[in-house]
Every structure is written in C-alpha cells, then in structure tokens.
Amino acid sequence: MAWIRTVPDEKAEGRLARIFEAAKARAGRVFGIVRLMSLDPTILQASMQIYTATTTSPKLPLPRWFRELVAVEVSRTNDCFY
C-alpha cells in the first residue's frame, strides 16, 4: 500500500489550518482526500474551489442532489470509495 505524508490537524498552521477548519465545519472532519493535499495548501484550496464550483454552488442549473448523485455514480464506476 502506498503512503503519502500529510499534515495532521494539530500541526496545521495559517492557511492550511483555516482550510481544515472549513472542512470540519462543512463535513464534521477532515476527510483523507482533503488531507492528501495538505502539504501544498495552494493546491488544496484550488481543488476545493473546483469541487465547490462543480458540485455545491447554488448557481448551477441542476439541483444539488442530482449533482451529488452523479458524483457518487462516477466514483462507484471508478471503484473509488470517496
């Protein structure tokens, strides 16, 4: 199994700490997919912006439940448990 070094919650500082706090507020914890990018907060923040723009933005024409359903089906098709 591959192992990637990440930053634990208690070691997060500055921008990364703010991103982690937002993740906790949104989902109750920092999921592994978010923690995976913790060594580069710039990339993590950009990734979260893309995620928000494509799945949770209220400005999108499809309802959120449908966008999330598509994301789940794509993950399942790709054998990805996220």
Image (tube, rainbow, N blue to C red):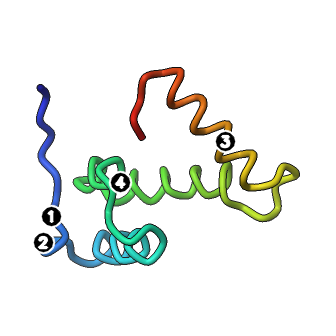
Q: CA distance from mark 4 to mark 1?
A: 11 Å
Q: Residue 45 placed where, x, y %?
A: 44, 59
Q: CA distance from mark 2 to mark 3?
A: 34 Å
Element at label 2? helix
Label 4, on which residue? 34
Label 1, on which residue? 8
Label 2, on which residue? 11
Q: Residue at x 84, y 49 (%)?
A: 62
Q: Residue 36 placed where, x, y %?
A: 27, 47
Q: Are marks 4 and 3 in contact (CB under 8 Å)?
A: no
Q: Residue at x 33, y 56 (%)?
A: 31
Label 3, on which residue? 69
Q: Are marks 1 and 2 in contact (CB under 8 Å)?
A: yes
Q: Earlier in the sequence, mark 2 or mark 3?
A: 2
Q: Are marks 2 and 3 in contact (CB under 8 Å)?
A: no
Q: Amino acid at mark 2?
A: Lys
